[in-house]
Image (cartoon, coloured by chain):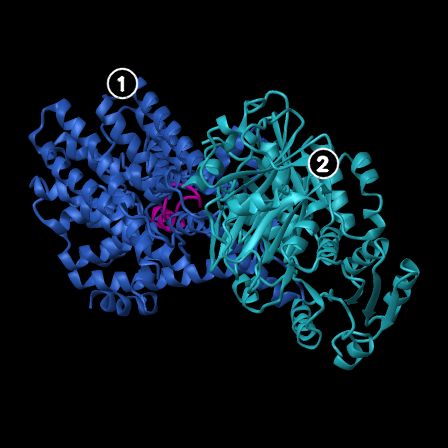
Chain colours: A blue, B cyan
């Protein structure tokens, strides 16, 4: 294992985080908040430590798959630990583990909170909390790839470890250009949302935080009732934008290039919107049958469906109170998740599509035993590796999920709470049902359960394998030995 | 860091490369190092993944001659299109389609004699920017070596008017222990030592450099003077009179034709009867033997003991290497040249004491690289030829100076050149000259530069 290179990547990650902490400092200055001072030592510390770690560039700068995964997973852990320090040091979140939970939830764009009174936080803390969504949405390492010189294969191994989806495609031949285009689209859409929200009369601070939350499909609200108190216009704008941020970003690149046919033909995106529309239709029908007004119901249903399928987790209504079918639809959407290549989490629409096609292929092989058939996506046959990867992903996903539910159940809360708490964190959504519903929070869990949920959030965001690899002993084989020898 | 400066500052060219074989991969390696945006195309998904996993390039699986695939690979924005699949026909078709789709520069690899005889015609009619034939290039390189058997390698520059020759200094040579500045005085010949390799280190030497036995020395001089110089230094300089070629490949055909033209007797051993008959038709003056070239008895019968040159040209690298080792054991006086296509262990091959090694892959890569580099540079100079030496640590580049270059008509002594860079040779009006401080570069000159700063693209970059 190329430890110096992992150190190097970690150093850069720390440096970038330290640099971005200047933003909450600025917010603190504007609002004249003393809590903002806590960002200064943490930022300087991160910059200094990062600087020391990248001081000497390793001679062998190659990152293989293993190093790529380990570096990514460790980066995210370090990012969360350092990012949680201001919350804890300032005393606004008194317990360290709670602060870590909140930050992990931020960077992984989950949006699950342990705070019962969000509005009591200072503005700079609220800003940093929402900004972690924006940074975590597209990925810190993707940002890193934009600025760093590295040999060819290395970039791809890092990009692959951090980007969601069954296979990672590049928009441009070079990773660096791809990363730049992704961030430009991301930034452009965020700015557009801020402008549209401002046009709806939202205060600038709220508009920024809401846009960060929707861009990263995170979902930290800055109000206790999340988005419920905003005007219908603002809710509609947010609905549209979270849906857009949950779409595969390749489509925007294709649209920019005016390749309309290819863009509109993307199977995953079509399936995604079909699921969204169908879910809204069913929920609206059920709620209206119960006597609700159509206009508001449509708005609420659309908002909740968009928020859950893109794994954002904003809420405009307490969907905990909805009839069972509607609640169940939301839980199913939690698992489906957003598109691959978006900022959302979950299993991903493309994987669901591939799994369904594999199922059909399997059924077909019973009917016509000798038939040869390839699973296709967008008219192109998928390689065996990709299909196998999707299957293995699903199995690992279910395993971790079951184990997590089991571990969280030690807390003794009811089954629906446990189940949806794990579903909401593992899929990076935020609120679940019952006690962890939109009006509740995760503060009720014991430290152990919180740690398990933190793990779930990280594993969910990085799509399992990079995080699992940290716990697989052969990954470290020979490394500890070498470190010990070097020390001696 | 100097290496990065030349390559990475500008956005690279958009290059589409069809065919992920040996040459394809080696091109991807070199071109992506120089910062170009590369898309590879191959029919085999596994070949494409292997390349995209290793280098920062994107890949498309499919037939490179199909317009749809070319579009997917981004033909509309492509600057250069290179086709190096195994099939000549496919390469030509790919390039023709690409040429019609967008007016990018197209490069095709064409190996069969059927087409390469009229490569000039094909180039014009199909609008190709370059047709490259590695087998023929390899054969010409081998032929140059057989004309000067003491050399480890001979490369020609300036359309054959200048030669870059590499030799190893033996024990008790006249060159042993001599300072380079004495060399110039005593010989007063137009010879310039441009690089010396000693125990793994490469030096671009100046006058104060002292030679020693065991050094591998590279010098450049007008083509007709190399023999004279070596003769005066006590080296054997006669050309071989006969050559034994083992294996009747395409390269063997090109080599035999070349050797026969300069009056060398050629024997070719080939295992396939049909190919033997074909060769005897094509090369009536050569002796064609039918048999297995790896049979030691047959080799003796074919006259390996009397041969002045042995060139194994079978399609299998391992066989070629063993045949060379065998030839060096049984006929120590014979010049052996080994052609290695595939094997990628340069360190191991270097330890085998094979003498001269020719890699068609590298010849192709260097030629295409030279083309791509000048494509990305300004118009007031052009790269005519490029040679990588000493494991890519040193490059020799032949520039063509054009009107508008900032270096014209300034005496060389007044140019602030980079360190580790040498203007080795000037070629003007059919005259090759080793430049002194008072010489100036004029428009239309060809300038050969030797340097450890790899990645130069235009003449102006030789300045510090």
Q: What residue is drawn where x is 42% and y is 59%? A: A393
Mark pair 2, 1: CA separation:
61 Å
Q: What residue is drawn where x is 29% and y is 33%? A: A212
x, y percentage for residue A342? 41, 41
The answer to whether residue A222 is visible is no
Quarter of the image where one finds residue B337: bottom right
Tag on residue A201? 1
x, y percentage for residue B435? 59, 34
Q: What residue is drawn where x is 45% and y is 47%? A: A349
Based on the picture, tell me whether residue A330 belongs to the magenta stretch: yes
Q: Point out the image quarter for the N terminus of chain B.
A: top left
Which residue is at the far bottom? Answer: B297
Chain designation of label 1: A
Q: Nearer the viewer, mark 2 or mark 1?
A: 2
Q: Magenta segment range?
A: A328-345
B186 and A62: which is toward the camera: B186
Asked if residue A143 is positioned above or below residue A348 in the image, the reply reads above
Asked if residue B431 is positioned above or below residue A368 in the image, the reply reads above
Q: Point out the image quarter for the C terminus of chain B.
A: top left
x, y percentage for residue A157? 42, 52
A437 and B258: which is toward the camera: B258
Left or right? Give the position of A232 relative to B131.
left
Give the crowd class for mark 1: few <14, some 14-19, many >=20 residues within 10 Å.
few
B178 and B336: which is toward the camera: B178
Which residue corresponds to mark 2? Answer: B129
Quarter of the image where one finds residue B367: top right
Give the crowd class for mark 2: few <14, some 14-19, many >=20 residues within 10 Å.
some
The answer to whether residue B223 is visible is yes
Task: Tell me the element at label 2.
Answer: loop
């Amino acid at each position: 294992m190329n430890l110096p290179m992992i150190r190097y990547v970690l150093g850069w990650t720390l440096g970038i985080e330290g640099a971005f902490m200047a933003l909450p400092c600025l917010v603190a200055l504007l609002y004249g908040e003393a809590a903002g001072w806590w960002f200064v030592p943490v930022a300087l510390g991160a910059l200094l430590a990062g600087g020391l770690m990248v001081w000497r560039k390793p001679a062998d700068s190659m990152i293989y798959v293993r190093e790529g995964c380990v570096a990514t997973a460790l980066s995210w852990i370090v990012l969360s630990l350092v990012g949680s320090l201001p919350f804890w040091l300032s005393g606004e979140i008194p317990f360290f583990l709670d602060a870590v939970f909140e930050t992990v939830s931020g960077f992984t764009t989950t949006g699950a909170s342990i705070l019962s009174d969000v509005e009591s936080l200072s503005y700079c803390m609220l800003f940093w909390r929402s900004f972690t969504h924006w940074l975590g949405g597209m990925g810190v390492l993707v940002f890193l790839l934009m600025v760093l010189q590295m040999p060819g294969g290395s970039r791809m191994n890092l990009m692959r470890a951090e980007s969601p989806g069954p296979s990672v495609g590049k928009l441009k031949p070079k990773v660096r250009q791809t990363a730049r285009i992704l961030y430009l689209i991301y930034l452009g859409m965020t700015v557009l949302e801020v402008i549209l929200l401002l046009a709806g009369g939202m205060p600038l601070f709220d508009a920024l935080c809401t846009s960060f939350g929707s861009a990263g499909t995170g979902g930290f609200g800055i109000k206790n009732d999340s988005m419920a108190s905003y005007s219908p216009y603002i809710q509609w704008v947010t609905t549209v934008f979270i849906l857009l941020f949950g779409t595969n970003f390749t489509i925007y690149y294709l649209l920019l290039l005016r390749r309309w046919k290819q863009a509109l033909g993307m199977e995953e995106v079509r399936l995604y919107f079909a699921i969204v529309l169908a879910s809204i239709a069913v929920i609206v029908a059920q709620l209206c049958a119960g006597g609700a007004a159509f206009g508001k119901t449509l708005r609420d249903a659309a908002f909740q469906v968009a928020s859950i399928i893109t794994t954002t987790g904003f809420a405009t209504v307490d969907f905990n109170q909805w009839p069972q079918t509607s609640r169940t639809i939301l839980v199913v959407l939690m698992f489906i998740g957003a598109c691959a290549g978006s900022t959302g989490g979950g299993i991903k629409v493309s994987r669901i599509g591939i799994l369904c096609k594999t199922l059909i292929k399997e059924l077909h092989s019973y009917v016509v035993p000798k038939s040869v058939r390839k699973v296709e996506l967008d008219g192109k046959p998928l390689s065996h590796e990709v299909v196998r990867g999707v299957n293995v992903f699903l199995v690992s996903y279910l395993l971790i999920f079951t184990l997590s539910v089991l571990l969280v159940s030690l807390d003794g809360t009811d089954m629906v709470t446990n189940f949806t708490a794990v579903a909401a964190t593992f899929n990076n959504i935020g609120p679940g049902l019952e006690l962890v519903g939109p009006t509740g929070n995760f503060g009720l869990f014991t430290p152990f359960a919180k740690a398990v949920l933190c793990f779930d959030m990280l594993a969910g965001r990085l799509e399992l394998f990079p995080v699992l690899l940290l716990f697989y002993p052969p990954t470290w084989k020979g490394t500890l030995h070498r470190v010990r020898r070097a020390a001696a | 860091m100097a290496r990065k400066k030349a390559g990475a500052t500008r956005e690279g060219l958009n290059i589409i490369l069809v065919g992920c074989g040996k040459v394809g991969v080696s091109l991807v390696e070199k071109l992506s190092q120089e910062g170009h945006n590369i898309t590879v195309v191959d029919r085999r998904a596994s070949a494409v993944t292997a390349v995209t996993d290793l280098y920062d390039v994107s890949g498309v699986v499919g037939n490179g001659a199909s317009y749809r695939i070319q579009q997917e690979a981004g033909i509309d924005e492509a600057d250069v299109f290179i086709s190096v699949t195994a099939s000549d026909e496919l390469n030509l078709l790919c390039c023709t389609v690409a040429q019609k789709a967008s007016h990018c520069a197209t490069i095709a690899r064409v190996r069969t004699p059927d087409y390469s005889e009229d490569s000039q015609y094909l180039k014009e009619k199909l609008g190709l920017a370059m047709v490259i034939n590695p087998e023929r290039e390899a054969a010409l390189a081998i032929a140059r070596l057989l004309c000067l058997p003491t050399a480890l390698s001979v490369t020609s520059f300036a359309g054959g008017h200048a030669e870059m020759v590499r030799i190893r200094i033996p024990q008790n040579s006249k060159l042993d222990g001599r300072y380079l500045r004495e060399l110039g005085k005593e010989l007063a010949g137009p010879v310039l030592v441009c690089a010396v390799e000693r125990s793994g280190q490469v030096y671009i030497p100046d006058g104060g450099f002292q030679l020693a036995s065991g050094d591998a020395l590279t010098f450049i001089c007008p083509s007709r003077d190399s023999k004279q110089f070596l003769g005066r230094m006590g080296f054997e300089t006669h050309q071989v009179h006969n050559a034994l070629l083992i294996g009747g490949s395409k390269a063997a055909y090109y080599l035999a034709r070349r050797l026969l033209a300069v009056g060398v007797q050629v024997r070719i051993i080939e295992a396939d009867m049909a190919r033997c008959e074909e060769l005897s038709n094509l090369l009536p003056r050569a002796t064609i033997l039918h048999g297995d070239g790896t049979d030691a008895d047959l080799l003796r019968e074919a006259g390996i003991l009397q041969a002045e040159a042995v060139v194994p040209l079978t399609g299998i690298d391992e066989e070629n290497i063993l045949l060379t080792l065998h030839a060096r054991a049984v006929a120590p006086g014979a010049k052996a040249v080994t052609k290695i296509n595939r094997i990628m262990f340069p360190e191991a091959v270097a330890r085998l004491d094979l003498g001269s090694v020719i890699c068609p892959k590298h010849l192709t890569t260097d030629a295409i690289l030279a083309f791509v580099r000048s494509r990305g540079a300004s118009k007031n100079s052009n790269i005519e030829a490029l040679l990588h030496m000493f494991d890519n640590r040193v490059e020799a580049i032949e520039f063509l100076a054009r009107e508008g270059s900032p270096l014209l008509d300034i005496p060389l002594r007044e140019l602030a050149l980079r360190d580790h860079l040498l203007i080795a040779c000037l070629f003007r009006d059919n005259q090759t000259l080793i430049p002194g401080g008072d010489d100036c570069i004029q428009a239309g000159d060809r300038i050969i530069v030797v340097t450890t700063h790899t990645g130069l693209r235009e003449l102006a970059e030789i300045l510090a």
